[in-house]
Amino acid sequence: MSGVWVFKNGVFRLVENPQAESEVRHGKRKMLVHLPTGEVVTSYAFLERILIGLGWERYYDGDVDLYQFHKHCSIDLISLPKDFSKFNSIHMYDIVIKNPNVFHVRDKW
């Protein structure tokens, strides 16, 4: 694994794409596009419908700050902030990696 370890609010986390996180902080916004329909993901309701169609299920672990999804056939877990305004390119790339050929991250125009 490569990336940068970041310590924030008493928690260490690995940022695999520090450039993407920097872009978010400096105003270069990204958008998640559902490739089969060409639609931009603008809400968790829309994203959840797509993920459920791909075999993902909501995972409830008691964390009130996260939406999480998992697949029975894998160890993958998608964790997203409950507040959609905090949904950023790091979360988008996580979704793209775990769902190849279904999503794409693009620059917002």
Image (cartoon, rainbow, N blue to C red):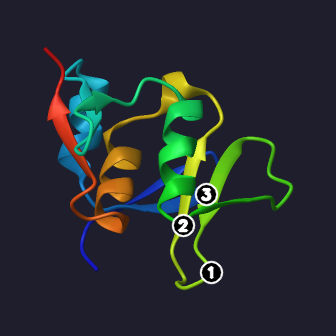
* Disc number lying in front (1 or 3): 1
Query: Which of the marked residues, 2 or 3, is nearer the chain's N terminus?
Result: 3
- In depth, the one of 13 and 31 nearer the eye is 31
Q: Which residue is drawn at 24% across and 74% down?
A: 2
Mark 1 near mark 3, Cβ–Cβ under 8 Å? no
* Cα–Cα span, label 2 and label 3: 31 Å
Query: Which of the marked residues, 1 or 2, is nearer the chain's N terminus?
Result: 2
Residue occupied by mark 2:
55
Amino acid type of the residue tagged 3 in the rendering: Val
* Cα–Cα span, label 1 and label 2: 8 Å
Return the mark for residue 11: 3
Residue occupied by mark 1:
72
Secondary structure under tag 1 reads: loop
Q: Is 101 left, or right, of 11 in this rendering?
A: left
Mark 3: few/some/many CA within 10 Å (<14, 14-19, 20+): few
* Disc number lying in front (1 or 2): 2
Amino acid type of the residue tagged 2 in the rendering: Gly
Return the mark for residue 23: none
